[in-house]
Image (cartoon, rainbow, N blue to C red):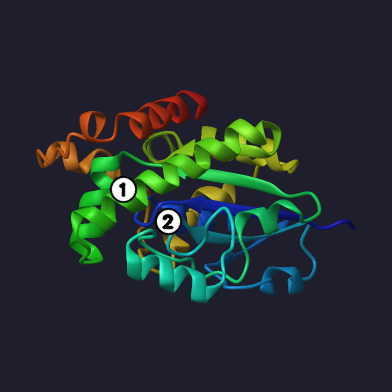
């Protein structure tokens, strides 16, 4: 049995843990949650093994030395450096690699990072922008091995998205994938929570991202159009 590899990426607070848990319910797929190295390659008996990492604090497109990144951060050239031992480019060299990029409304991501992770707007907005920019670059450069999923659509139409993911990974869809919310290790719920969709809009939180960061916002809208 040949083993293929999967990398799930997205901004922090964008639903990557939920998505990874749902995919990991499949009997032929083994997913690790935020592993720093190659531990997924020691998973036995699964056709597909994968890892979930958040952009940019856990993984970046390229890997710089820790000394370089600390220096760049000190002088203000870099806001964060990845905790992963391997970059996205390293993952791209793995056999049968597939990448799933999860995108979520920027207002929801930023407000959640600020409230739950106690980060300032500068850091929270950078995390959302960097994740959008990297997923957009991956989809542009490696279209056939990259799948884009919308968090909002995942919650509203879970079965359609799981069927789409299963087809992308070359496995049969299994209904047990919909049980993911119950097995989410950090935010377990009996079912998908529709209240998490467009929460910032309901709370009238608007960071005016389309005017503050027009280039990134345009890329986000392009990714949304591909997440169908």
- Please indicate whether residue 128 sits to the left or right of residue 137 in the image: left
Query: On screen, 28 above or below 207?
Result: below
* Residue ID at (35%, 61%): 79
Instruction: Say the numbered circle drawn on residue 118.
Output: none
* Residue ID at (68%, 57%): 91
Q: How far is mark 2 from mark 1, CA to CA?
A: 9 Å
- Please indicate whether residue 92 sits to the left or right of residue 213 in the image: right
Whether residue 25 is visible here, answered yes or no, is no
Considering every residue shown, the one lying at the far right of the view is 1
Label 1 element class? loop
Which residue is nearer to you in this view: 112 or 63? Answer: 63
* Mark 2, residue position: 181
Query: On screen, 45 above or below 7?
Result: below
Query: On screen, 48 above or below 200?
Result: below
* Residue ID at (66%, 41%): 166
Asked if the residue under mark 1 is in contact with the one under mark 2, i.e. CB atoms within 8 Å, the reply is yes
Which residue is nearer to you in this view: 198 or 205? Answer: 205
Which residue is nearer to you in this view: 178 or 84? Answer: 84
| Residue 71 percent location from the top left of the image | 42, 71
Which residue is nearer to you in this view: 18 or 158? Answer: 18
| Residue 27 percent location from the top left of the image | 69, 58
* Mark 1, residue position: 193
| Residue 43 percent location from the top left of the image | 73, 71
* Residue ID at (36%, 37%): 152
Q: Name the quadrant containing residue 104.
A: top left
Whether residue 133 is visible here, answered yes or no, is yes
């Amino acid at each position: 049995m040949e083993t293929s590899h999967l990398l799930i990426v997205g901004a922090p607070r964008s639903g990557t843990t939920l998505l990874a848990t749902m995919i990991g319910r499949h009997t032929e797929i083994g997913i690790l949650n935020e592993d720093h190295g190659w531990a997924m390659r020691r998973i036995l008996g699964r056709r597909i093994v994968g890892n979930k990492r958040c952009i940019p604090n856990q993984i970046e497109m390229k890997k710089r030395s820790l000394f370089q990144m600390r220096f760049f951060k000190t002088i203000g050239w870099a806001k964060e450096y990845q905790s992963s031992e391997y970059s996205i480019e390293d993952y791209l060299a793995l056999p049968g690699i597939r990448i799933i990029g999860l995108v979520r409304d920027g207002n929801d991501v930023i407000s959640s990072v600020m409230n739950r992770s106690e980060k300032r707007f500068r850091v929270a907005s950078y995390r959302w922008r960097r994740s959008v920019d990297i997923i957009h670059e991956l989809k542009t450069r490696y279209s056939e091995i990259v799948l884009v999923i919308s968090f909002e659509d995942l919650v509203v139409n879970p079965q359609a998205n799981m069927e789409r993911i299963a087809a992308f990974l070359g496995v049969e869809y299994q209904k047990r994938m919909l049980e993911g919310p119950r097995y989410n290790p950090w935010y377990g719920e009996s079912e998908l929570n529709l209240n998490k969709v467009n929460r910032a809009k309901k709370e009238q939180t608007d960071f005016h991202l389309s005017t503050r960061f027009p280039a990134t916002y345009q890329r986000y809208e392009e990714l949304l159009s591909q997440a169908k």
